[in-house]
Amino acid sequence: MKKGKFIVVEGLDGSGQSTQVEKLAGGLRKNKIKTHVTKEPTNNLIGGLIRGQLQEDWKSTPECLQLLFAADRAHHLEKDVKPYLEKGITVISDRYFFSSMAFGSLEIDDWGWLKDINKRFMLPDITFYLQVSPKTCIKRISENRFSFELFEKEKKLKAIGESYKRIAKEYDSFEIIEGEREVEKIAKEIKNKVLKIY
């Protein structure tokens, strides 16, 4: 059986990546492509610990947080992503280890270490990064939520965006998509790029 494709959508908080994940899944299903949607951090036990820290319910060192992300990812791949791919089903993930590296680089200067703790994980067939300005992201977040999470400050988002640009240079199949356009135009561009890899 032909393996499914592994697709990742990345972006700053408020960039609209969750919306584009759902749009892409719907578009692929219309093309008779079986699709499974997932996300990181997961809703499993380790993912819950991570969410608690992002919402500032508890605190650990930045290194501890990154190791939790890696543990959650290892479990996610084993129990969710790989079984679907092996059945020939395409998996679309809302965030992956690129998020950990980009967001983690705010507090951890050792880029090599951030890469090393994720280097054993499989690479996606294609990754889309929605490029949206920090100002626009903050505006969207303030319109849709009552509170801000750990990394949702404009200065921090700008630094994270720079790390994503570095990632785009270091990893193949990492596509930067202009994210400040109509939702449907973005969705169409992403779907067309994905259909080319089948």
Image: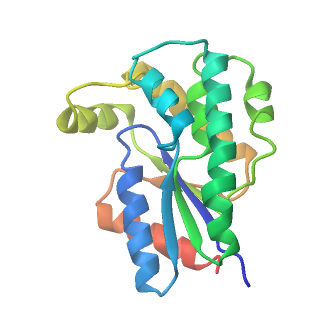
Task: Note whether residue 170 is visible.
Answer: yes
Q: Position of residue 177 (x, y in %)?
A: 49, 55
Task: Note whether residue 105 is visible.
Answer: no
Q: Position of residue 4 (x, y in %)?
A: 65, 74
Residue visible at 47% across and 43% down? Answer: 43
Answer left or right for 77 relative to 18: right
Question: Which quarter of the image is occupied by the N terminus?
Answer: bottom right
Q: Quadrant of residue 152?
A: top left
Residue lying at the far bottom of the rendered structure: 32
Q: Quadrant of residue 173?
A: bottom right
**Residue 172 sits above or below residue 13 on the image:** below
Answer left or right for 47 relative to 97: left
**Residue 46 sits above or below residue 76 on the image:** above
**Residue 53 sits above or below residue 15 on the image:** above
Q: Position of residue 129 (x, y in %)?
A: 52, 50
Residue visible at 51% across and 73% down? Answer: 35
Question: Which quarter of the image is occupied by the C terminus?
Answer: bottom right
Front in this rendered view, residue 47 or 175: 47
Residue visible at 63% across and 29% down? Answer: 68
Q: Position of residue 54 (x, y in %)?
A: 44, 24
